[in-house]
Amino acid sequence: MRAPRRALLGLSSLSLLLFASIASAQVDLSGNWRPIDSPDQLDQAEGPAPVDYVGIPLNDQGRAMTATADPSAEQDELYRECTTWQVNYFVEGPFNIQISPIGTAFDSNDVQAWQMSGTPDRQPELIWVNGHPPPPPLTLHTYAGFASGHWEGDTLAVHIIDMKDNWMLRNDAPESNQATVDMFLNRQGELLTMLFVIRDPVYLGAPYPRARAFQLVPGSPSYSIPSGNDCMPAEVISDFSDGYHAARFLPGKNPDVDEMQRYHIPTSVALGGVQEIYPQFQKVLDKQYSIPGGYCQRDCCAAQAIRGTQCPAPPKAGAPGRAAAGERPRRQAR
């Protein structure tokens, strides 16, 4: 027996209403979120090693920039002494983050924006979800940029534009002021997954995805900043603060450019490249790579702890303020 046409139309309308309610559903993202340990724990705590850009789809211009980067001195440039980090620092840094609804309580299901904060050395990220129009094309760029979001099911999809040029990673992987970020936030109970997709027409030859997971914890975010942070006047170098000099190495003069060879990673691979994001690149690397032995001279205990094995004896300690024997000093993470 055929169903009446009116009944079929009613079912279709009900299905569309249900789909619309699901598509526009908002999830309560508020809370204090602690990053969960991951295989990237060493990079997220102390920061990546110098000239370790493996897997980043840098184009030729991006590779040239990384080959001359000097992470220990670049923040002495004019207007960079007290610079903050980009939005990428949410997946790059060691600190907790706090997410709060703006404009109304979440119970009203009428949140105007979400604010991501809690990290002391980056600007709060305000994510408009009420259709707030973007700024005009020639607007002033900021370190937070302009973020607008909408719900795709239970995932908040965010698009960020108008960011200042900065560093994609803490070892000075470059990011231009033409870069954009697509961020996806998904909460499942007490777990929050954050996915970034970075696009940069100046330094990247392909989109660069990054992800991180967070655990809900009580209280407000806690953090500590070393006393010798980047805003100390003693760190300002006159030669770099006149607006005409850049704290970079000349081509071919970077002493860290072959840093990753200690792990048998060729320098050409360490500098990144679009080809490195594809699975078939493994066959190319297999011809150049061999497993090193006895090379652990930095972060040995932390590296072994992640793998669940017994920590070896640390390298011979150096004098105060100096690196241990056979170990290159690393920039202190903020």
Image (spheres, rainbow, N blue to C red):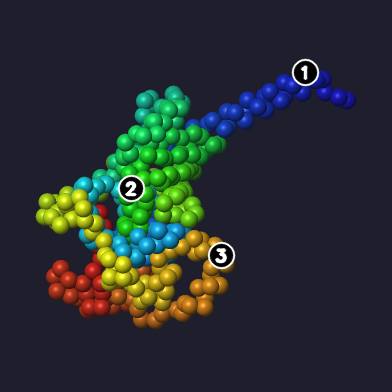
Residue type highlighted by circle 2: Asp
| Disc on the earlier residue, 3 or 1 | 1
| Disc on the earlier residue, 2 or 3 | 2
Residue labelled with disc 3: 279
Front in this rendered view, residue 284 or 311: 284
On the rendered image, what quadrant is the N terminus found in? top right
Residue labelled with disc 1: 6
Residue labelled with disc 2: 165
Q: Position of residue 240 (x, y in %)?
A: 18, 55
Q: Count of labels shown?
A: 3
Give the SS element for disc 2.
loop
Image point 40% across, 62% down: which residue? Answer: 63
Answer above or below: position of 247 versus 253: above
Look at discs 3 and 1 and give the one toward the viewer. 3
Answer above or below: position of 151 versus 209: above
Residue type highlighted by circle 3: Pro
**CB under 8 Å between discs 3 and 1:** no
On the rendered image, what quadrant is the C terminus found in? bottom left
